[in-house]
Image: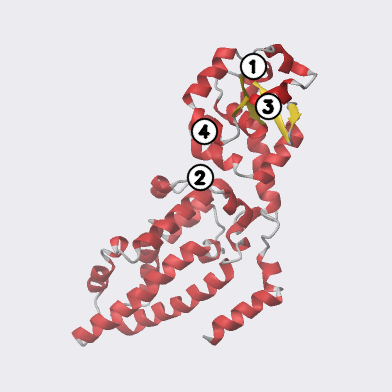
Amino acid sequence: MPSDLTSSSIDRQNVLNNRYALEKIEEHLALGGLEFEGDRLFTKQQLTELFDVSDSTIEKYLSTHGDELKANGYQLLKGKKLRDFKGLSYGPVTDYGTKTSVLGVFNFRAVLNIAMILTESERAKAVRSRILDIVIDVVAERAGGHTKFINQRDADYLPSAYREYSYRKVFTDALDQYLDMGKFKYGIYTNKVYQLVFKENAKEYKQILKLAKGDNVRDTFYSEVLKAIASIENGLSQDMATKAGELGRKLSPSELDALLEGLEENPYLKPVIDDARTKMASRDMSFRDALHIKLESYLQTVPEGDVDKFLGDASRSLEEQLSDPETLEVFKRLKDR
């Protein structure tokens, strides 16, 4: 998690898309608000008191971050809704008077959004710090105590890992049969495939994720990354066989490098590679607090569906999945193909 939420809309939205963290934040912060139609709403006056800022300061952020705040729960009450809201007999609602025809209100999510962008308030700064602490704790707790292998909680991980393992065998066999090079070729060309997919070699990747010496890099890959690697390994294996057949001999390293060139822009592979880069960059920033600098341009907000996929009640550890008869049946079908 970043240490300064004020500077990145992606980082803010990653927090606000994590409903598990929001539940804990609401419980721990107890900011107040008014219960209305199943939601907890705050008026602008309540926000000025909560964060010790002026009315004009809140208005400034509504002007500069209006779309973001609306997307996260800021709304204008009119007509019957406003009359019902005014009918609450307590708090600052009545302070707006009976002639008010439109009233802007913030739900809890929008209040957190304001707290994450409000630089003039020490109280907002304290809320941001607490938000970060709670998000980190919730992600770690729901991931089983650590996030190193959070990728394995995805129901698609095991089938993807099994398929990639199969294509990996095809690739290493092709290197053995069609590349004229010593045994170190396997490590060298594995790194070249990694660099093609996510622009880092294994050593760089391990440093960014702070993996231990004995950790297997591929065990930490998301299913989309495994799919991209498998696609390249399988396609490159076929290209090697074809080229070696044309030449009537094994390929030299420079000839294999020539086959690798241009694959990044291959129209069949580009969508798969772009998806893998986006998923790796965005999820690792959100879930693992890891920034892939070479993939920074691919950073996006992690959608709520991804939060559920890795942290939700349906997500399960690798051990739990392997003990599931349905999962084992999937492996049996893959094996029988």
Question: Taking 295 as reference, is 40 left or right?
Answer: right
Residue 158 appears anywhere in the view: yes
The structure residue drawn at horizontal position 68% and vertical position 19%, both measured from the top left corner, is 46
Looking at the image, the residue that sits furthest to the left is 247
- The answer to the question of whether label 4 and label 1 lie on touching residues, with beta carbons closer than 8 A, is no
* Alpha carbons under labels 2 and 3: distance apart: 35 Å
Mark toward the start of the polypeptide (2 vs 4): 4
Q: How many C-alpha atoms fall within 10 Å of the one at disc 4: few (<14), some, or many (≥20)?
A: some
Q: Could you tell me the amino acid type at mark 3?
A: Lys
Mark 2 lies on residue: 301
* Alpha carbons under labels 1 and 3: distance apart: 26 Å
Give SS at disc 4: helix
Mark 1 lies on residue: 48
Position of the N terminus by quadrant: top right
Q: Could you tell me the amino acid type at mark 4?
A: Glu
133 vs 77: above or below: below
Mark 4 lies on residue: 68
The structure residue drawn at horizontal position 67% and vertical position 63%, both measured from the top left corner, is 317
Q: How many C-alpha atoms fall within 10 Å of the one at disc 1: few (<14), some, or many (≥20)?
A: some
Residue 4 appears anywhere in the view: no
Q: Position of residue 114 (x, y in %)?
A: 59, 27
Mark toward the start of the polypeptide (2 vs 3): 3
Mark toward the start of the polypeptide (4 vs 3): 4
Q: How many C-alpha atoms fall within 10 Å of the one at disc 3: few (<14), some, or many (≥20)?
A: few
Give SS at disc 2: loop
* Between marks 2 and 4 in the image, the one whose residue lies nearer the viewer: 4
Q: Could you tell me the amino acid type at mark 1?
A: Thr
Mark 3 lies on residue: 80
